[in-house]
Amino acid sequence: MVTVIAECTVMGIPNISTNLSGFGCFMQQHIADPMSYGIYIIDRHFKCVEESVQQLAQVHVLCSFFAA
């Protein structure tokens, strides 16, 4: 799965990951502003389920503007 997400990033396709996944954790630790690269990291480690779902919904709305 990491290869696909990394390929999306290189191709400029926005992608969504979590800080519980290897890719999301790595990107959050090594890139100062992942969103500037189209990498949206949902916080599932420090937030409750409802907050994570809310954050995911916000990212989906934001990404829908890229598709328009």
Image: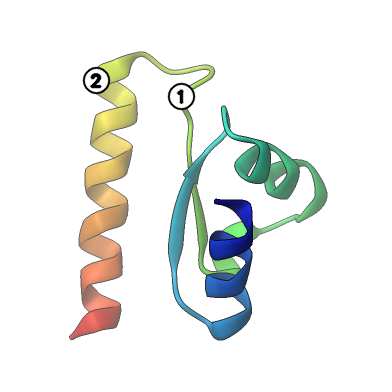
Looking at the image, which residue is at 20% across and 60% down? 61
* Mark 2, other Cα within 10 Å: few <14 / some 14–19 / many ≥20: few
The picture quadrant where one finds residue 63 is: bottom left
Distance between the alpha carbons at the discs numbered 2 and 1:
10 Å
Percent position of residue 40, x then y = 48, 54
User: Which quadrant of the rendered structure holds the C terminus?
Assistant: bottom left
Any mark on residue 58, and which?
A: none
What amino acid is labelled 2 in the image? Answer: Glu
What amino acid is labelled 1 in the image? Answer: Arg
In depth, the one of 47 and 67 nearer the eye is 67
The picture quadrant where one finds residue 55 is: top left
Percent position of residue 29, x then y = 78, 41
Percent position of residue 2, x then y = 61, 53
Label 2 SS: helix
Looking at the image, which residue is at 54% across and 63% down? 4
Looking at the image, which residue is at 58% across and 69% down? 36
Marks 2 and 1, the one that precedes in the sequence: 1
Colouring method of the image: rainbow
Label 1 SS: loop
* Mark 1, other Cα within 10 Å: few <14 / some 14–19 / many ≥20: some
Any mark on residue 44, and which?
A: 1
Left of 27 or right of it: where is 36?
Answer: left
Q: Which residue is mark 2?
A: 50
Residue lying farthest to the right in this orientation: 30
20 w.r.t. 28: above or below: above
The picture quadrant where one finds residue 13 is: bottom left
